[in-house]
Image (spheres, rainbow, N blue to C red):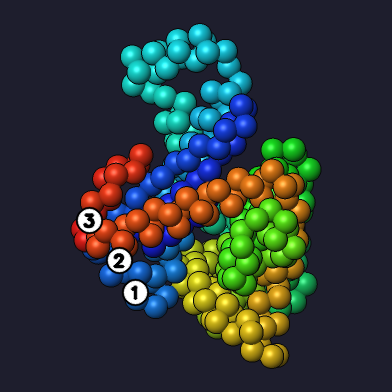
Amino acid sequence: MFGGKHINVTAVRRKNQEITFLEVPKSDKSWVIKLRRIPLLRGLVSIIDSSAKGSKHLNYSAEAFAEDEVEPEDLAKQKKKDKDEGWSLGMMLGVAVMGILSFIFGKLIFTLVPVLVENFLFKDAFDNYVLHNLVEGAIKLILLLVYLWAITLTPVVKRLFQYHGAEHKVISAFEAGEELTVRNVQKYSRLHYRCGSSFMMLTIILGVIIYSLVPWDNLWERVMQRVILLPLVIGVSFEVLKGTNAVKNVPGLKYLGYPGLWLQLLTTKEPKDDQVEVSIASFNRMRELDSAIEARGYAEVNVPGGILDPAKG
């Protein structure tokens, strides 16, 4: 999936080798656009918004896979049944992934479980709350690494992470001014500064720092502190991520983004040529639609996802 100025595009290779696209216009409300301009707050808004919109693209790829795995007559019957019941496979998967709720719930779990584990193992080991925060951060990092390593053992997630690597390679090749061919794209690294994996690492590192600025006396205070400060940790991490990307070409400062790049060694895998081909197709389609919108002077443009009128979005 690639996001342009006016549209998000996802490409999927079907069983017959055809590449199909989901093209969803960007139509943020005016109040969302305003929130995206406010430092600290824009990070939380962007992450939640991306999680919500990403579920639609995930549903599209899941539906395409499901359609390719069933017989045509069975698919027709299933679609009729879904229409009659008003409940499609995409809707069920949408509930399963529920962008916003899954993000909030997952982030809370990942934030609070290390607190409970650290308190259980090291409650009486030392009195300094900063040391407890450091150990908590270490436990959080270990849990993250183990989780990512474990899910990469599954073929589905491994393939997903290969496409993740392909996306990064395409972006890097484009930024370098290369012609987007499979051969050219494959020369580039699967790691990229602007990545959600880097964001995850930053929330761990900066979380330890921010939590250490506010003392706590017992487990209840500690848990409540984490919940209350979580939006701040997300906001600060987003700003730092933007900052590390801005200085990535400055000697000495580029190393600030290395922890996030190291984590991408787990969240990306080297893609195959056919996966790079799909990523190139998605990126080119996104640029084609964005250029068409700009060329028409923000006139209405028909795309499968709806009518896009940038003047209103």
Estimate how packed mark 1 is, as few (under 14), some (14 to 19) or many (20 or more) residues with alpha carbons within 10 Å.
few
Residue 254 in the image: state x and y as whole percent.
Answer: 67, 83
Label 2 – label 1 distance at C-alpha: 7 Å
Q: Nearer the viewer, mark 3 or mark 1?
A: 3
Q: Are marks 3 and 2 in contact (CB under 8 Å)?
A: no
Q: Which residue is mark 3?
A: 299
Residue type for callout 1 = Arg
Neighbourhood count class around disc 3 (C-alpha, 10 Å): few under 14, some 14–19, many 20 upward: some
Task: Provide residue 226's location: percent of width, then percent of height.
Answer: 53, 67
Left or right: residue 160 versus residue 217 is: right
| 3D distance between C-alphas at marks 3 and 2 | 20 Å
Residue type, numbered disc 3: Ala
Going by the numbered disc 2, the residue's amino acid type is Ile
Residue 139, above or below 105: below
Tell me: residue 33, above or below residue 290: below
Q: Identify the image quadrant of residue 145.
A: bottom right
Numbered marks: total? 3
Task: From the viewer's side, name the closer residue of 64 and 187.
Answer: 187
Residue drawn at the location 49% of the way across and 33% of the way down: 93
- Expressed as whole percent of the image width and height from the top left, the position of residue 75 reads 50, 15
Which quadrant of the figure contains the C terminus? bottom left
Q: Is residue 69 above or below residue 246?
A: above
Residue in the foreground of this view, choosing between 176 and 312: 176
Cα–Cα gap, marks 3 and 1: 25 Å
Q: Give the residue pinned by disc 2.
A: 33
The circle drawn on residue 37 is 1
Q: Which residue does the image show at 38% across and 23% down from the upper left?
A: 87
Q: Are marks 2 and 1 in contact (CB under 8 Å)?
A: yes
Q: For the residues carrying marks 3 and 2, which lies nearer the camera in this image?
A: 3
Report the side of 237 relative to 262 (left or right): left
